Image (tube, rainbow, N blue to C red):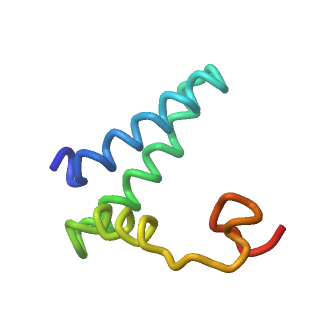
Amino acid sequence: MVAGVTYPFFVLNGIVAAELFLIFKSLFALLPALLIHALGYAAHLRDPHVMALWMTRLRRVPRIPNRKLWGANVYRP
């Protein structure tokens, strides 16, 4: 764990922070990254494996009937 969150969450948050900084070219763009980190920290306090559980849920979401039509697991066109 890094700074109270798991390493994958820390890296994902770093990517979001870097993208926001590059888009807006301001240090104030890093404030949403701090908010995201605080939310992640609160979630990891409750369950340290929240990121792994979320990734497992994304991988195992049930397939829907129009998956073949759109090539993805979407619910409406």
* Residue that appears at 51% across and 41% down: 31
Label total for image:
0
- Residue 71, x across and y down, in percent: 68, 58
Residue at the extreme left of the image, as rendered: 1
Q: Residue furthest right?
A: 77
Tell whether 76 sits left or right of 12.
Answer: right
Q: Is residue 8 above or below residue 73?
A: above
The picture places residue 22, in percent across and down from the top left corner, at 59, 22
- Looking at the image, residue 24 sits to the left or right of residue 10; the answer is right
User: Quadrant of the image for the C terminus?
Assistant: bottom right
Task: Say which of 62 and 15 sits in front.
Answer: 62
User: Residue 72 in the image: x percent, y percent?
Assistant: 65, 61
Q: Is 19 displayed left or right of 54 in the figure?
A: right
Look at 69% across and 79% down and name the residue there: 65
Identified at 49% across, 28% down, the residue is: 18
Looking at the picture, tell me which residue is in the foreground, 69 or 8. Answer: 69
| Front residue of 59 and 6 | 59
Is residue 39 shown above or below 11?
below
Which quadrant holds residue 29?
A: top right
Q: Which residue corresponds to the image point at 56% horizontal and 26% vertical from the top-left?
A: 21
Residue 48's spot in the image, x, y percent? 20, 66
